Amino acid sequence: MHHFTYRDHQLYAEDVAVKDIAARVGTPVYVYSAATLRRHFRVFDEAFAGADHLICFAMKALSNLSILKLFGSMGSGFDIVSVGELMRCLRAGADPKKIVFSGVGKRDEEIAAALEAGILMFNVESRPELDRIAEVARQRKVKAPVSLRVNPDLDPGTHPHISTGHRTSKFGIPLSQVFQYYAQARALPDLELVGLSTHIGSQITDTGPFIEAGEKLAAIVRKLRSDGIALRYLDIGGGLGIPYQEEPPPPAEYAAAILKPLTGLGVKIIAEPGRVLVGNAGILVTRVLYVKETDVKRFIVVDGAMNDLIRPVLYEAYHAIWPVHKPAADRPSVIADVVGPVCESGDFFAQERELPQVQRDDLLAVMSAGAYGFVMASNYNSRARSPEVLVDGTRMHVIRERDSFEDLVRGEKLVELGS
Ligand SMILES: *Cc1c(COP(=O)(O)O)cnc(C)c1O
Protein backbone atom coordinates (compact mmCIF):
# COMPACT_ATOMS: atom_id res chain seq x y z
CA MET A 1 0.00 0.00 0.00
CA HIS A 2 1.43 3.37 -0.99
CA HIS A 3 0.38 6.80 -2.19
CA PHE A 4 1.89 6.81 -5.69
CA THR A 5 -1.12 6.64 -8.00
CA TYR A 6 -2.24 7.70 -11.45
CA ARG A 7 -4.71 10.51 -11.91
CA ASP A 8 -5.77 11.00 -15.48
CA HIS A 9 -2.66 9.14 -16.72
CA GLN A 10 -0.26 11.25 -14.63
CA LEU A 11 1.67 9.69 -11.76
CA TYR A 12 1.12 11.51 -8.47
CA ALA A 13 2.95 11.33 -5.19
CA GLU A 14 -0.02 12.00 -2.89
CA ASP A 15 -1.43 15.25 -4.33
CA VAL A 16 1.67 16.38 -6.20
CA ALA A 17 2.29 15.45 -9.83
CA VAL A 18 5.62 13.68 -10.17
CA LYS A 19 6.32 15.55 -13.41
CA ASP A 20 6.08 18.85 -11.49
CA ILE A 21 8.67 17.62 -8.99
CA ALA A 22 10.99 16.62 -11.85
CA ALA A 23 10.47 20.03 -13.48
CA ARG A 24 11.32 21.80 -10.23
CA VAL A 25 14.33 19.90 -8.96
CA GLY A 26 15.50 17.98 -12.03
CA THR A 27 16.21 14.28 -12.41
CA PRO A 28 17.20 11.82 -11.16
CA VAL A 29 15.36 12.50 -7.91
CA TYR A 30 14.15 10.43 -4.98
CA VAL A 31 10.55 11.17 -3.99
CA TYR A 32 9.09 9.95 -0.69
CA SER A 33 5.48 10.03 0.51
CA ALA A 34 4.94 11.16 4.09
CA ALA A 35 1.45 9.64 4.22
CA THR A 36 2.92 6.28 3.22
CA LEU A 37 5.67 6.53 5.83
CA ARG A 38 3.14 7.40 8.54
CA ARG A 39 0.81 4.65 7.50
CA HIS A 40 3.54 2.02 7.43
CA PHE A 41 4.77 3.01 10.88
CA ARG A 42 1.26 2.96 12.30
CA VAL A 43 0.36 -0.41 10.78
CA PHE A 44 3.58 -1.96 12.06
CA ASP A 45 3.21 -0.42 15.51
CA GLU A 46 -0.41 -1.52 15.80
CA ALA A 47 0.56 -5.05 14.80
CA PHE A 48 2.53 -5.24 18.06
CA ALA A 49 -0.15 -3.50 20.16
CA GLY A 50 -0.83 -6.68 22.12
CA ALA A 51 2.69 -6.71 23.56
CA ASP A 52 4.81 -4.27 25.54
CA HIS A 53 7.00 -3.12 22.66
CA LEU A 54 9.28 -0.51 21.13
CA ILE A 55 9.82 -0.01 17.40
CA CYS A 56 13.40 0.99 16.58
CA PHE A 57 13.50 1.97 12.90
CA ALA A 58 16.62 0.46 11.30
CA MET A 59 17.76 3.80 9.94
CA LYS A 60 20.39 2.38 7.63
CA ALA A 61 17.49 1.77 5.22
CA LEU A 62 16.77 5.50 4.86
CA SER A 63 18.51 8.06 7.03
CA ASN A 64 17.52 11.54 5.85
CA LEU A 65 17.08 13.81 8.89
CA SER A 66 13.49 14.74 8.00
CA ILE A 67 12.49 11.09 7.69
CA LEU A 68 14.07 10.34 11.08
CA LYS A 69 12.24 13.30 12.59
CA LEU A 70 8.94 12.09 11.18
CA PHE A 71 9.38 8.61 12.69
CA GLY A 72 10.67 10.06 15.97
CA SER A 73 7.55 12.21 16.24
CA MET A 74 5.46 9.05 15.95
CA GLY A 75 7.27 7.47 18.90
CA SER A 76 9.82 5.46 16.99
CA GLY A 77 13.22 4.66 18.36
CA PHE A 78 16.20 3.82 16.13
CA ASP A 79 18.48 0.92 15.41
CA ILE A 80 21.90 2.34 14.54
CA VAL A 81 25.07 0.77 13.20
CA SER A 82 27.60 3.61 13.40
CA VAL A 83 28.41 6.83 15.22
CA GLY A 84 27.34 8.69 12.09
CA GLU A 85 23.90 7.21 12.45
CA LEU A 86 23.91 8.05 16.16
CA MET A 87 24.64 11.68 15.38
CA ARG A 88 22.03 11.79 12.65
CA CYS A 89 19.24 10.54 14.84
CA LEU A 90 20.26 12.80 17.73
CA ARG A 91 20.30 15.73 15.28
CA ALA A 92 16.77 14.74 14.27
CA GLY A 93 15.69 14.91 17.92
CA ALA A 94 15.61 11.20 18.77
CA ASP A 95 15.25 10.07 22.37
CA PRO A 96 18.58 8.35 23.22
CA LYS A 97 16.70 5.96 25.50
CA LYS A 98 15.11 4.54 22.36
CA ILE A 99 18.36 3.85 20.51
CA VAL A 100 19.88 0.40 20.09
CA PHE A 101 23.35 0.02 18.62
CA SER A 102 23.90 -3.00 16.35
CA GLY A 103 26.80 -4.17 14.18
CA VAL A 104 29.85 -6.43 14.35
CA GLY A 105 32.55 -3.76 14.30
CA LYS A 106 31.96 -0.99 16.83
CA ARG A 107 35.03 1.21 17.36
CA ASP A 108 36.01 2.56 20.78
CA GLU A 109 35.01 6.11 19.82
CA GLU A 110 31.63 4.83 18.72
CA ILE A 111 31.09 2.95 21.97
CA ALA A 112 32.13 6.05 23.93
CA ALA A 113 29.79 8.32 21.97
CA ALA A 114 26.88 5.96 22.51
CA LEU A 115 27.60 5.74 26.25
CA GLU A 116 27.83 9.51 26.38
CA ALA A 117 24.44 9.83 24.64
CA GLY A 118 22.92 7.30 27.06
CA ILE A 119 21.47 4.83 24.57
CA LEU A 120 19.11 2.01 25.51
CA MET A 121 21.52 -0.81 24.73
CA PHE A 122 24.36 -2.24 22.66
CA ASN A 123 23.63 -5.40 20.70
CA VAL A 124 26.90 -7.25 21.16
CA GLU A 125 28.22 -9.68 18.57
CA SER A 126 31.44 -11.16 19.93
CA ARG A 127 33.51 -11.81 23.04
CA PRO A 128 36.20 -9.23 22.20
CA GLU A 129 33.49 -6.63 21.59
CA LEU A 130 31.98 -7.40 24.99
CA ASP A 131 35.39 -6.81 26.57
CA ARG A 132 35.89 -3.53 24.69
CA ILE A 133 32.49 -2.20 25.72
CA ALA A 134 33.25 -3.14 29.35
CA GLU A 135 36.63 -1.39 29.11
CA VAL A 136 35.27 1.81 27.57
CA ALA A 137 32.48 1.88 30.17
CA ARG A 138 35.03 1.36 32.98
CA GLN A 139 37.14 4.27 31.72
CA ARG A 140 34.07 6.47 31.66
CA LYS A 141 32.85 5.19 35.04
CA VAL A 142 29.46 4.16 33.72
CA LYS A 143 27.67 0.87 33.24
CA ALA A 144 27.06 -0.17 29.66
CA PRO A 145 23.64 -1.72 28.96
CA VAL A 146 24.19 -4.73 26.73
CA SER A 147 22.15 -7.27 24.91
CA LEU A 148 23.75 -10.28 23.26
CA ARG A 149 22.92 -10.91 19.63
CA VAL A 150 22.48 -14.57 19.02
CA ASN A 151 22.81 -16.22 15.64
CA PRO A 152 19.91 -18.70 15.63
CA ASP A 153 21.41 -20.74 12.77
CA LEU A 154 18.57 -20.86 10.31
CA ASP A 155 18.03 -20.16 6.65
CA PRO A 156 15.72 -17.18 6.12
CA GLY A 157 15.42 -18.03 2.42
CA THR A 158 16.53 -14.65 1.12
CA HIS A 159 19.40 -13.39 -1.05
CA PRO A 160 22.76 -14.56 0.42
CA HIS A 161 24.03 -10.98 0.71
CA ILE A 162 21.17 -10.09 3.07
CA SER A 163 20.96 -13.36 4.97
CA THR A 164 22.45 -12.97 8.45
CA GLY A 165 21.05 -15.75 10.62
CA HIS A 166 22.99 -18.76 9.39
CA ARG A 167 25.91 -20.04 11.45
CA THR A 168 28.35 -19.32 8.63
CA SER A 169 27.48 -15.59 8.69
CA LYS A 170 29.66 -13.04 10.49
CA PHE A 171 26.72 -11.94 12.63
CA GLY A 172 25.78 -12.93 16.13
CA ILE A 173 27.00 -15.27 18.80
CA PRO A 174 26.72 -19.00 18.06
CA LEU A 175 23.75 -20.66 19.74
CA SER A 176 26.08 -23.20 21.31
CA GLN A 177 28.01 -20.46 23.15
CA VAL A 178 25.21 -18.21 24.22
CA PHE A 179 24.99 -19.29 27.88
CA GLN A 180 28.74 -19.18 28.26
CA TYR A 181 28.63 -15.60 26.94
CA TYR A 182 25.97 -14.56 29.43
CA ALA A 183 27.97 -16.08 32.26
CA GLN A 184 31.08 -14.20 31.11
CA ALA A 185 29.18 -10.95 30.64
CA ARG A 186 27.63 -11.28 34.08
CA ALA A 187 31.10 -11.40 35.57
CA LEU A 188 32.03 -8.04 34.03
CA PRO A 189 31.03 -5.35 36.55
CA ASP A 190 30.96 -2.53 33.98
CA LEU A 191 28.16 -4.15 32.03
CA GLU A 192 24.49 -4.34 32.72
CA LEU A 193 22.90 -7.35 31.04
CA VAL A 194 19.56 -6.15 29.78
CA GLY A 195 18.64 -8.12 26.69
CA LEU A 196 18.82 -10.76 24.03
CA SER A 197 18.66 -9.89 20.36
CA THR A 198 18.77 -11.33 16.89
CA HIS A 199 18.37 -10.30 13.27
CA ILE A 200 18.15 -13.10 10.75
CA GLY A 201 18.18 -11.31 7.41
CA SER A 202 16.30 -8.96 5.15
CA GLN A 203 13.48 -9.12 2.58
CA ILE A 204 12.11 -12.25 4.25
CA THR A 205 8.78 -13.21 2.71
CA ASP A 206 7.63 -16.06 4.91
CA THR A 207 6.79 -16.19 8.63
CA GLY A 208 8.47 -19.58 9.12
CA PRO A 209 12.01 -18.32 9.83
CA PHE A 210 10.70 -15.68 12.26
CA ILE A 211 8.74 -18.30 14.20
CA GLU A 212 11.79 -20.56 14.30
CA ALA A 213 13.94 -17.69 15.58
CA GLY A 214 11.27 -16.69 18.12
CA GLU A 215 11.11 -20.21 19.53
CA LYS A 216 14.88 -20.37 19.92
CA LEU A 217 14.99 -16.96 21.60
CA ALA A 218 12.16 -17.81 23.98
CA ALA A 219 13.97 -20.95 25.10
CA ILE A 220 17.11 -18.90 25.80
CA VAL A 221 15.22 -16.28 27.83
CA ARG A 222 13.58 -19.01 29.95
CA LYS A 223 16.84 -20.83 30.59
CA LEU A 224 18.58 -17.57 31.53
CA ARG A 225 15.79 -16.74 33.96
CA SER A 226 16.18 -20.10 35.64
CA ASP A 227 19.91 -19.31 35.89
CA GLY A 228 19.09 -16.05 37.66
CA ILE A 229 19.51 -13.69 34.68
CA ALA A 230 16.26 -11.77 34.19
CA LEU A 231 16.33 -9.88 30.90
CA ARG A 232 14.27 -6.78 30.21
CA TYR A 233 14.38 -6.69 26.42
CA LEU A 234 13.99 -9.17 23.65
CA ASP A 235 15.04 -7.64 20.33
CA ILE A 236 13.67 -9.59 17.39
CA GLY A 237 15.52 -7.58 14.71
CA GLY A 238 14.01 -6.57 11.39
CA GLY A 239 13.80 -8.33 8.10
CA LEU A 240 10.16 -8.38 7.02
CA GLY A 241 10.04 -8.08 3.23
CA ILE A 242 8.00 -5.86 0.97
CA PRO A 243 6.21 -6.69 -2.28
CA TYR A 244 8.80 -5.93 -4.96
CA GLN A 245 7.58 -8.97 -6.88
CA GLU A 246 6.86 -11.53 -4.17
CA GLU A 247 4.04 -11.28 -1.59
CA PRO A 248 5.33 -11.12 1.98
CA PRO A 249 2.93 -11.46 4.91
CA PRO A 250 1.41 -8.20 6.17
CA PRO A 251 2.82 -6.81 9.46
CA ALA A 252 -0.16 -8.07 11.49
CA GLU A 253 0.45 -11.64 10.37
CA TYR A 254 4.20 -11.31 10.91
CA ALA A 255 3.71 -9.87 14.41
CA ALA A 256 1.18 -12.52 15.38
CA ALA A 257 3.55 -15.25 14.20
CA ILE A 258 6.62 -13.95 15.95
CA LEU A 259 4.83 -12.94 19.17
CA LYS A 260 3.24 -16.35 19.67
CA PRO A 261 6.37 -18.09 20.97
CA LEU A 262 7.29 -14.95 22.94
CA THR A 263 4.16 -14.53 25.06
CA GLY A 264 4.47 -14.77 28.80
CA LEU A 265 8.22 -14.12 28.84
CA GLY A 266 7.82 -10.86 30.75
CA VAL A 267 10.15 -8.95 28.44
CA LYS A 268 9.64 -5.84 26.35
CA ILE A 269 9.75 -6.67 22.64
CA ILE A 270 11.96 -4.50 20.47
CA ALA A 271 11.48 -4.67 16.71
CA GLU A 272 13.94 -3.18 14.22
CA PRO A 273 12.05 -2.84 10.94
CA GLY A 274 13.84 -1.03 8.14
CA ARG A 275 12.71 -1.90 4.64
CA VAL A 276 9.06 -2.57 5.50
CA LEU A 277 8.60 0.97 6.84
CA VAL A 278 10.21 2.84 3.97
CA GLY A 279 10.66 0.61 0.92
CA ASN A 280 7.39 1.34 -0.83
CA ALA A 281 7.29 4.92 0.41
CA GLY A 282 9.94 6.07 -2.07
CA ILE A 283 10.50 6.14 -5.82
CA LEU A 284 13.43 7.13 -7.98
CA VAL A 285 12.35 9.34 -10.86
CA THR A 286 14.59 9.31 -13.89
CA ARG A 287 14.44 10.78 -17.39
CA VAL A 288 14.96 8.97 -20.68
CA LEU A 289 18.05 10.20 -22.50
CA TYR A 290 18.23 7.84 -25.47
CA VAL A 291 16.58 4.76 -26.83
CA LYS A 292 19.32 2.64 -28.34
CA GLU A 293 18.56 -0.34 -30.55
CA THR A 294 21.06 -3.00 -31.56
CA ASP A 295 20.53 -6.17 -33.60
CA VAL A 296 19.63 -8.09 -30.48
CA LYS A 297 18.63 -5.64 -27.77
CA ARG A 298 16.78 -2.45 -27.01
CA PHE A 299 18.25 -0.20 -24.31
CA ILE A 300 16.44 2.64 -22.65
CA VAL A 301 19.27 4.86 -21.44
CA VAL A 302 18.12 7.01 -18.51
CA ASP A 303 19.82 9.70 -16.44
CA GLY A 304 19.66 7.69 -13.21
CA ALA A 305 22.29 5.01 -12.64
CA MET A 306 23.72 2.37 -10.32
CA ASN A 307 25.35 5.11 -8.26
CA ASP A 308 21.81 6.30 -7.43
CA LEU A 309 20.27 2.86 -6.88
CA ILE A 310 22.60 -0.12 -6.68
CA ARG A 311 20.10 -2.76 -5.58
CA PRO A 312 19.48 -4.35 -9.01
CA VAL A 313 23.11 -5.32 -9.52
CA LEU A 314 24.02 -5.81 -5.86
CA TYR A 315 21.11 -8.05 -4.89
CA GLU A 316 19.63 -9.04 -8.26
CA ALA A 317 16.70 -6.98 -7.01
CA TYR A 318 13.54 -6.45 -9.00
CA HIS A 319 12.05 -2.96 -9.10
CA ALA A 320 8.84 -2.28 -10.98
CA ILE A 321 9.22 0.59 -13.45
CA TRP A 322 6.24 2.82 -14.13
CA PRO A 323 5.94 5.50 -16.77
CA VAL A 324 5.23 8.87 -15.14
CA HIS A 325 2.86 9.62 -17.99
CA LYS A 326 0.88 6.45 -18.51
CA PRO A 327 0.19 5.90 -22.19
CA ALA A 328 -3.16 4.80 -23.57
CA ALA A 329 -3.75 1.10 -23.05
CA ASP A 330 -3.59 0.36 -26.77
CA ARG A 331 -0.07 1.77 -27.18
CA PRO A 332 2.28 -1.13 -28.01
CA SER A 333 4.80 -2.23 -25.42
CA VAL A 334 8.44 -3.11 -25.94
CA ILE A 335 10.99 -5.38 -24.27
CA ALA A 336 14.00 -3.39 -23.12
CA ASP A 337 16.83 -3.04 -20.63
CA VAL A 338 16.67 0.15 -18.60
CA VAL A 339 20.27 1.27 -18.12
CA GLY A 340 22.17 4.26 -16.79
CA PRO A 341 25.17 6.24 -18.03
CA VAL A 342 27.75 4.64 -15.70
CA CYS A 343 30.58 2.74 -17.36
CA GLU A 344 29.70 -0.69 -15.95
CA SER A 345 27.62 -3.48 -17.44
CA GLY A 346 26.05 -3.84 -14.00
CA ASP A 347 24.52 -0.41 -14.39
CA PHE A 348 20.89 -1.32 -14.98
CA PHE A 349 17.53 -0.91 -13.29
CA ALA A 350 15.78 -3.63 -15.28
CA GLN A 351 16.66 -6.24 -17.87
CA GLU A 352 14.42 -7.67 -20.59
CA ARG A 353 11.48 -5.81 -19.11
CA GLU A 354 8.18 -5.20 -20.83
CA LEU A 355 7.56 -1.47 -20.82
CA PRO A 356 5.48 1.03 -22.74
CA GLN A 357 7.26 2.61 -25.67
CA VAL A 358 9.18 5.64 -24.48
CA GLN A 359 11.11 8.44 -26.10
CA ARG A 360 13.64 11.05 -25.10
CA ASP A 361 12.55 13.20 -22.14
CA ASP A 362 9.90 10.80 -20.92
CA LEU A 363 10.01 10.20 -17.17
CA LEU A 364 10.15 6.78 -15.55
CA ALA A 365 9.58 5.94 -11.89
CA VAL A 366 11.64 3.14 -10.38
CA MET A 367 9.22 1.93 -7.72
CA SER A 368 9.89 0.69 -4.16
CA ALA A 369 13.18 2.58 -4.00
CA GLY A 370 12.73 4.01 -0.50
CA ALA A 371 14.81 1.40 1.32
CA TYR A 372 18.53 0.91 0.67
CA GLY A 373 18.21 3.36 -2.20
CA PHE A 374 19.55 6.84 -1.55
CA VAL A 375 21.54 5.63 1.47
CA MET A 376 23.69 3.49 -0.81
CA ALA A 377 24.14 6.23 -3.40
CA SER A 378 27.71 7.12 -4.29
CA ASN A 379 29.57 9.64 -6.40
CA TYR A 380 30.97 6.98 -8.74
CA ASN A 381 31.77 8.42 -12.18
CA SER A 382 31.79 11.80 -10.39
CA ARG A 383 28.03 11.86 -10.52
CA ALA A 384 26.18 14.08 -8.11
CA ARG A 385 23.98 12.25 -5.65
CA SER A 386 20.30 12.90 -6.29
CA PRO A 387 18.15 15.27 -4.32
CA GLU A 388 15.48 13.86 -2.00
CA VAL A 389 11.96 15.26 -1.94
CA LEU A 390 9.36 14.51 0.72
CA VAL A 391 5.76 15.00 -0.37
CA ASP A 392 3.14 15.62 2.30
CA GLY A 393 -0.34 16.03 0.84
CA THR A 394 -0.22 18.96 -1.56
CA ARG A 395 3.22 20.10 -0.42
CA MET A 396 6.69 19.06 -1.52
CA HIS A 397 9.78 19.63 0.58
CA VAL A 398 13.30 19.29 -0.77
CA ILE A 399 14.86 17.42 2.17
CA ARG A 400 18.25 17.10 0.51
CA GLU A 401 19.77 19.14 -2.30
CA ARG A 402 21.51 17.57 -5.25
CA ASP A 403 25.30 17.43 -4.76
CA SER A 404 27.15 20.39 -6.28
CA PHE A 405 30.55 20.11 -7.95
CA GLU A 406 32.06 21.53 -4.75
CA ASP A 407 30.42 18.66 -2.83
CA LEU A 408 32.10 16.22 -5.21
CA VAL A 409 35.60 17.52 -4.52
CA ARG A 410 35.12 18.47 -0.85
CA GLY A 411 38.19 17.60 1.16
CA GLU A 412 40.39 16.95 -1.86
CA LYS A 413 43.73 18.76 -2.15
CA LEU A 414 45.67 19.77 -5.24
CA VAL A 415 49.23 19.08 -4.05
CA GLU A 416 52.40 20.34 -5.73
CA LEU A 417 54.33 17.28 -6.93
CA GLY A 418 56.46 18.39 -9.87
CA SER A 419 56.42 16.28 -13.01
C1 LIG B 1 19.57 -4.06 8.51
C2 LIG B 1 19.14 -4.40 9.88
C3 LIG B 1 17.78 -4.31 10.24
C4 LIG B 1 16.71 -3.93 9.26
O1 LIG B 1 16.50 -4.88 8.29
P1 LIG B 1 15.26 -4.73 7.28
O2 LIG B 1 15.33 -5.94 6.45
O3 LIG B 1 15.48 -3.48 6.52
O4 LIG B 1 14.02 -4.68 8.10
C5 LIG B 1 17.45 -4.57 11.55
N1 LIG B 1 18.38 -4.92 12.47
C6 LIG B 1 19.68 -5.04 12.16
C7 LIG B 1 20.65 -5.41 13.20
C8 LIG B 1 20.10 -4.78 10.86
O5 LIG B 1 21.39 -4.91 10.55
Image (cartoon, rainbow, N blue to C red):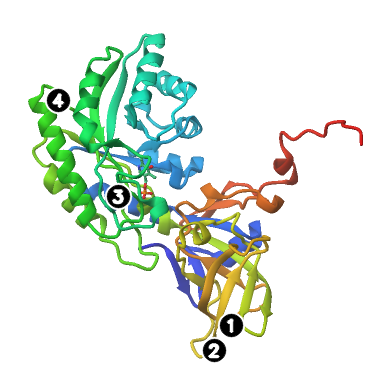
Asked if residue 35 can be seen in this view, the reply is no
On screen, residue 234 above or below 340: above
Q: Secondary structure at mark 1?
A: loop
Task: Mark 3 vs mark 1: give the one in front.
Answer: 1
**Cβ atoms at labels 2 and 4 below 8 Å apart:** no
Please tell me which residue lies in front, 408 or 16: 408
> Marks 2 and 1, Cα distance to the nearest angstrom?
7 Å
Q: Residue furthest bottom?
A: 330
Q: Is mark 3 within 8 Å of ligand 1?
A: no
Question: Any mark on residue 332, and which?
Answer: 2
> Marks 2 and 4, Cα distance to the nearest angstrom?
65 Å
Mark with earlier residue (1, 4): 4
Mark with earlier residue (2, 3): 3
Quadrant including the N terminus: bottom left
State ligand 1's quadrant: top left
Q: Residue at x 67, y 47 (%)?
A: 403
On screen, residue 73 above or below 29: above
Q: Position of residue 31 (x, y in %)?
A: 52, 57
Task: Answer with the quarter of the image where residue 145 lies.
Answer: top left
Q: Position of residue 52 (x, y in %)?
A: 18, 37
**Cβ atoms at labels 2 and 1 below 8 Å apart:** yes
